[in-house]
Image: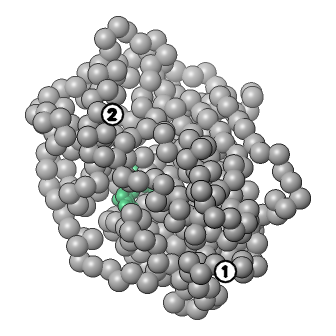
Amino acid sequence: MSQQPIEIDDQEAPRSDDEGETTEEAPPRMSSEPEHHSGSEESKTSTRSLSGSFLEEHFENGRRYCNEIYYMPNDEPEQIRLAIVHQAYLPVLDGQLTLARVPSSTRRILDVGTGTGDWAMAMAERFNNAEIIATDITSVFQPGSGPPNVEFELDDAEEEWTYNDLFNFIHLRDMSGAFADWNFIYAEVYKHLTIGGSVEIADHGMIQLKNEPPNSYVKAYNGALQSAAEKAGRPIGLEHLERLMIERAGLHFSRSRTFEVPLGTYPTDPVRKVAGKMAMIAALEGLEAVSLRLLTRHLAWKEEDVRNLCAKVQEEVMNPDARAFIPLQIVVYRKMMWTLPS
Ligand SMILES: C[S@@+](CC[C@H](N)C(=O)[O-])C[C@H]1O[C@@H](n2cnc3c(N)ncnc32)[C@H](O)[C@@H]1O
C-alpha cells in the first residue's frame, strides 16, 4: 500500500449484519457480570479501594521502579520515552488513535496500563461524550489533569476487575511483559465488555536488523531479554496476540495489522521517515529501560555489562545500512454475544 508503507499485513474479518458497532444498549446480564449503574458518579470507578502500596518507590541501577515486579522504570526519562512512543504511533496509524471502529456514540472506554495517559487524554478529546477510565499500577499520570471526561485510577489489572459498569472499548498498548497470565486478562476483558464492544491490543516485538551482521549485539540483547523475561514468568514479545489465545476467551476476531516500524531516518518515504525518527529516539532511550532490571535480576548480569551491551546495540541500530526496524502488531477483537468462554 503506497499510503501505508510501514504496513506489511492487514487482515479483517468479513463484516456481518450483527456487526453493529458498540451499542448503548445494556446487554443481558449473566450472574458473574458486573452490575450496570449507568451515569452515576460511582459508575466511573472500580470498587477496589486504593492502597498506599501502589505508590512504592524502588531505586536500582540508577532507575526508579513502582514495585518489585514490573520490569520497566517509572521515572522521568521513562515518562518522556512513553510520550515519544505515543507520538510515534500516530504516523503509523495515519493520525488515528486506534484501528478499531469506535463509533461517536461510544459511552465508556477503558485504557489498561495507561502510563502517562497520553492515549487516554487524546481519546477523551476525540470522544468528548464518552467516559474514559485510565488505569495503572503507578501514578505517572497526573490525577485531575487532562480533559474532564478522563478519570485516572490506580488499579492492578492482574487482580479481579471490579468496575461497576461495562465498557464499549478496552485498550491495551505496550503491555508485553506486564502480565503473568494473559488468559486471565482476556477473561476479564470479556466480562467487562458490552455486547458489540471491542478490545484492541497493540504491542511490538524485539528490534530487528534487515542487514544483520553475524553474531550481532542486537541478537545477543534480544536473546538475553527473552530468557530473562521467561525466568521472570512474564514473557515479552507478541505471543499474547495469538488468535487462538484471544478467541479462547470468547472474543471474535475483527482486525489485525502488522507493521515494520523503521528505526531511523533511512526511509525515503516521508511518513516512514517521521515514524522512524521518533521510533529511533524511543528505542534508543528504551534499551537500558527495558533491560536493566531484567538482566541484573534474572540473569545476574552486572549493571555495567548491561550498559555496555546497550551501547553496542545502540551503535548497530544507528547504522543506517543495518536498516533497523521494530515489528508492531495491532489486533482488534469483539464480543458478539454472551457465550461461555472455552
Ligand atoms: C510500557 S508502558 C505502556 C503505557 C501506555 N499503555 C502507552 O501505550 O503509553 C506499560 C504500563 O503498564 C503499567 N502496568 C504494568 N503492570 C500493570 C498491571 N498489573 N496493572 C496495570 N498497569 C500495569 C506500567 O506501570 C506502565 O505504565
Which corner quadrant holds the N terminus?
A: top right
Q: Is residue 35 above or below residue 336?
A: below
Determine which residue is flagged by label 1: 29
Q: CA distance from mark 1 to mark 2?
A: 41 Å
Residue drawn at x 71%, y 36% as measured from the top left: 10
Distance from mark 1 CB to nearest ligand 1 atom below 8 Å: no
- The furthest residue to the top: 214
Task: Decide which of 254, 2 is in the foreground and name it.
Answer: 254
Which one is nearer the viewer's eye here, 38 or 59?
A: 38
The crowding category of the residue bearing disc 2, from other C-alpha atoms within 10 Å (few below 14, some 14 to 19, many at least 20), is: many
Amino acid bearing label 2: Gln
Q: Is residue 81 left or right of residue 23?
A: left
Counting from the top left corner in percent of width and height, residue 186 is at 53, 58
Between marks 1 and 2 in the image, the one whose residue lies nearer the viewer: 1
Q: Taking the image as four quarters, which one is ligand 1 found in?
A: bottom left
What x and y, as percent, mark residue 292?
Answer: 21, 40
Residue 52: x, y in percent?
Answer: 23, 77
Disc ID at residue 312: none
Quadrant including the C terminus: bottom right
Residue 155 sits in which quadrant? bottom left
Say if 244 sits above or below 17 in the image.
above
Which residue in the protein does label 2 denote?
226
**Callout 1: few (<14), some (14-19), or many (20+) C-alpha neighbours within 10 Å?**
few
Please determine whether, in this image, residue 321 is positioned above or below residue 227: above
Sequence-first tag of 1 and 2: 1
Q: Position of residue 48 (x, y in %)?
A: 39, 81
Indicate the quadrant where residue 39 lies.
bottom right
- Asked if residue 74 is positioned above or below residue 217 in the image, the reply reads below
Residue type at tag 1: Arg
